[in-house]
Amino acid sequence: MSVATGSIQAAFCATLIDELERAGVTDAVVSPGSRSTPLALAIAGSSLRMHVRLDERSACFVAVGLARTTQRPVLVLVTSGTAAAELLAGVVEAQLDRVPLIVATADRPPELHGIGAAQTIEQRGIFGPHVLSAIDPGPVHALPPSSWRPIASRLVHDALTGPCAGPVAINLPFVEPLVAEPGPVPPGRSGGRPWYSTAPGAKTSAVELAVGGRGVIVAGQGAGSSDLVLGAARRLGWPVLADPRSGLSSSDRCVVTVADTIVRDDRLAATMRPETILIAGAPPASKVLAGWIDDAAAAGAELVLLGGDGLHRHPSQLAALVVPGPADHLWPRLRPGGVPDDPSWLGRWSALQGAIDSTFAQALDDPAWNEPAVVRTIAQLDAASTIVASSSMPIRDLEWFGGTRPRPPVIHANRGANGIDGVVSTAMGVALGSPGPVVAIVGDLAFLHDVSSLVEGLGEGDQGSLTIVVLDNGGGGIFSFLPQRSSVPAEAFARLFTTQRSPRPEAVAAGFGLRSHVVADAGSLRTRLAESVGSAGISVIVCQLPDHDSNVEVHARLVADAVAAARAAVGV
């Protein structure tokens, strides 16, 4: 191809980046590669913050963390071939958890497909149903310049303004020469406006809930402003069963953070069965709570989903009413449909919260040393901190034992696909987008699973502060809570599920030049947290914890003691 073709290609890339900036995109995560050169150079020459990551899978999860924090789409750029395939896990997480991403994959031109050309695979549609839209415009030098800005602006529009946010993809076949001076760039709209602007949606009409009295609000991430949610709860006289990611784990008397423990007990679960269940935001992490919701709905409770994508996000098929619209438009419009039948309803939930949380606080205070105690210690950090919790046990321990705070810290977790993929990378992205310190709670396997993320650290200049607390229990601790523990022979269980490994997390961290400490008691953990949280760059604190069976016993004892206190508090 000619120099003129390369110049047109470079102009397209400059236009695309300019249009993304106009639409509010501020960050791009780039993995090195040759075929992606035209767009990488356009990013490097723009005002976007560029974050370079060697591993494409890590790059995508860094983008997930950044987008969670900034609430803006983040651009991810990779080269052609298997680099595109490496993005799939992060794209799946973004799609399921409503995280806006713009995934740009460079490709070889059509004439190099199907002939064995190097680094050439079929990339069209590679993300399948896991993206909200996919644009494959063909070789960009053949596109009319009048289409360039609409293509770029549509990426942001599709990532943000459908029924839910999520990832979008664009596949760009680039031809040689890959390095060229850009030709003329078509003008954008006046005043720096994006090509497509989206007007605010119509306000949702007033909603009256015809309820007889006893109801609960189940609030997950995306449930809405805490003031609006709690205001509705007070008007209705209902408790808010708050997931850790909801941002609602405050000390307000309407807030219940121990619902999982309450409904684990058959007697309490039956006594506290509601007549209406209102679900907003992401589904709860607790499988037990989800089962209690289904049981209550099957027994006649009305199940109401707030938000237009509720039917696609909650596994229960028993919803009686779906109320579409942004959550913050809906909360002020919720009113009780009648006089509450049971004025003591909210008081009993509050009594259960107090009894159970007091039990946990007493049991997990210094000098306790176990996984719940470590997680509770981190959950009590200053509200200026942000917490990233891994799937498997950390997010569950936060839900069970995290407690309430007058001003709770922000909590993030990859609860879309619920995997341990890219947890450290996600935490890095959160740290890059957060104004305050970030603390990640990860298991030893999740830490090692994402070890390639440690190559670049937080990037040039170690922007941000990230403390990674590794719960080292020998690997795979969650499986000891599952039927496999008792039904699979011990040797096979150890090999297949505990995934025993030889590399020590602290040695791995030190090998990457990171500050690394090993602690084995509560006092040492607090000391190291005080030193690390807020310090520049990455620190790793490895907590050496009791074995899996001991952890199962601790959880069982905590729940048994808490249930006994809860029963006494409400007289059942």
Image (spheres, helix red, strand yellow):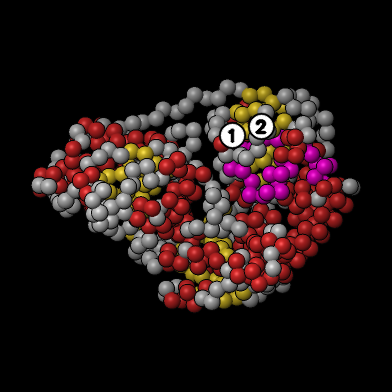
- Please say if 161 is above or below 173: above
Residue 510: x and y in percent read 46, 76
- Residue 523 lies left or right of residue 136; in this view the side is right
336 w.r.t. 455: above or below:
above
| Residue 276 forms part of the magenta stretch | yes
Front residue of 268/463: it is 268
Q: Are marks 2 and 1 in contact (CB under 8 Å)?
A: yes
What is the spatial separation of the Cα atoms under label 2 and label 1, in whole angstroms? 8 Å
Q: Relative to 154, is 547 above or below?
A: below
Which amino acid lies under the numbered mark 1 shown in the image of this protein?
Leu
Q: Which residues are magenta?
A: 268-293
Q: Is residue 128 magenta?
A: no
- Residue at the image point whose x is 81% and y is 50% from the top: 265
Q: Secondary structure at mark 1?
A: helix
Residue 491 percent location from the top left of the image: 66, 72
* Mark found first going from the N terminus, 2 or 1: 1
